[in-house]
């Protein structure tokens, strides 16, 4: 039998197989998901794992976490790794069934939500960090410290974990159509939690962060209108791109969840509409998963120092030193990088 469910964090797929003409059969949706989702998840796992590990290595080895921005970048990379950590399990699930037990069903659902909320919160904090550095320079000298960066990061993780509790409580491995699936199992007589979860996702994961980011960047752009500080402009540009990419990759998923919420309450009805929403859910969720691969790419193409750090990271490995040490490029490059870092102030630094 083909898979009868995808990762159902919030959706209420009505996958039924019956001769009753009144029941909406979705064999085509399931067949599509059985090959599309595992393929995409595997790609995201490989790219996201490699890219974010590189970011963490660069931050720990070369940046040494000397600023609040570095702390937030490190935590953002860890948030992205939360996604890719569970993807091999989800890939097996959508291709066959959930065989990992009820405990891991709850755990990985919670990990997914914690990674999402912490990721958007850290992007929001990075926007606030840039806002303070550009608009409130004097106050930023006292507030933008490593200690405050660590403190606010701990608060973000606690809030993200708390917001993810519904996924931990309601996710269960349950039998459905002769197979075991992992999905939220809300009380059938109460629609409160079934509606609360996607609305929480929309509000905390999109509307509130977007409002904060919009305010911060409106003030930043106004302050930079006559500013000639190129380092500040580069730093703001990079984090602005990170924010825009996040919105582009997560907004479709949030819209689909809202539409499914309307479908669950009977505001919109119909088997064909239900199928379209199921396809849209699979496509938009996969698109959102690819987001965890993109921040390292943005850093590479927009951050000159990040390119140098990556080159240095590979030049310092034993294989490269054996082959290329006679040319002397690694030592020359390290000297240039050290000199460059000494001439750059903390408040105007490029994030990577």
Image (cartoon, rainbow, N blue to C red):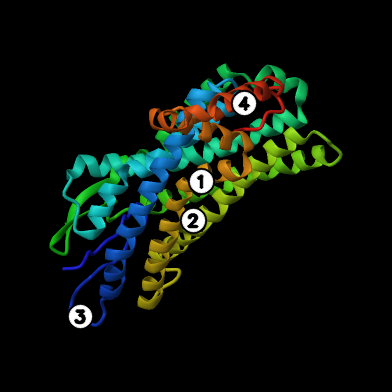
- Can the viewer see residue 132 in this picture? yes
Q: Nearer the viewer, residue 213 or 126?
A: 126
Where does the image place residue 231, in percent across and percent down from the top left? 73, 33
* Residue drawn at the location 29% of the way across and 45% of the way down: 170
Q: Are marks 4 and 2 in contact (CB under 8 Å)?
A: no
Tell me the distance, in whole angstroms, between the alpha carbons under discs 2 and 1: 8 Å
Disc ID at residue 20: 3
Q: Are marks 2 and 1 in contact (CB under 8 Å)?
A: yes
Q: Nearer the viewer, mark 4 or mark 2?
A: 4
- Residue position marked by numbered label 4 in the rendering: 337
* Residue drawn at the location 54% of the way across and 27% of the way down: 328
Q: Count the numbered circles shown.
A: 4
Where does the image place residue 143, in percent across and percent down from the top left? 66, 20
Tell me the distance, in whole angstroms, between the alpha carbons under discs 1 and 4: 38 Å
| Side of 38 where 317 appears, left or right | right
Residue 208 vertical placement versus 60 (above, below):
below
Tell me the distance, in whole angstroms, between the alpha carbons under discs 2 and 3: 33 Å
């Amino acid at each position: 039998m083909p898979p009868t469910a995808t990762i159902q964090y919030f959706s209420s797929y009505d996958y039924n197989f019956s001769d009753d003409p009144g029941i909406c059969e979705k064999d085509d949706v399931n067949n599509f998901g059985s090959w599309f989702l595992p393929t995409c998840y595997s790609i995201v796992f490989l790219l996201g794992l490699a890219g974010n590990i590189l970011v963490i290595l660069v931050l720990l080895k070369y940046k040494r976490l000397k600023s609040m921005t570095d702390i937030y970048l490190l935590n953002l990379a860890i948030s992205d790794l939360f996604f890719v950590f569970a993807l091999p399990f989800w890939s097996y699930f959508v291709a066959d069934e959930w065989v990992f037990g009820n405990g891991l069903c709850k755990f990985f659902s919670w990990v997914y939500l914690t990674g999402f909320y912490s990721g958007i919160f850290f992007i929001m904090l990075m926007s606030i960090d840039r806002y303070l550095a550009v608009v409130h320079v004097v106050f930023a000298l006292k507030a933008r410290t490593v200690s405050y960066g660590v403190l606010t990061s701990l608060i973000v993780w606690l809030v993200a974990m708390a917001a993810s509790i519904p996924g931990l409580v309601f996710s269960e491995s349950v039998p459905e159509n002769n197979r075991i699936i992992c999905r939220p199992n809300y009380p059938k007589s109460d629609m409160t939690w079934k509606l609360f979860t996607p609305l929480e996702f929309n509000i905390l994961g999109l509307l509130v962060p977007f409002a904060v980011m919009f305010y911060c960047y409106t003030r930043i752009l106004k302050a930079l209108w006559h500013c000639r500080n190129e380092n500040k402009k580069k730093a703001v540009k990079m984090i602005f791109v990170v924010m825009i990419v996040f919105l582009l990759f997560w907004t479709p998923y949030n819209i689909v969840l809202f539409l499914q919420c309307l479908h669950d309450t009977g505001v919109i009805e119909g088997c064909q509409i239900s199928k379209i929403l199921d396809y849209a859910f699979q496509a938009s969720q996969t698109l959102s998963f690819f987001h965890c691969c993109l921040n390292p790419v943005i850093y590479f193409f927009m951050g000159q120092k990040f390119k140098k750090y990556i080159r240095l990271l590979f030049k310092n490995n034993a294989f490269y030193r054996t082959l290329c040490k006679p040319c002397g490029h690694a030592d020359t490059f390290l000297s240039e990088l050290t000199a460059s870092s000494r001439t750059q102030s903390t408040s105007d630094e490029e994030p990577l």
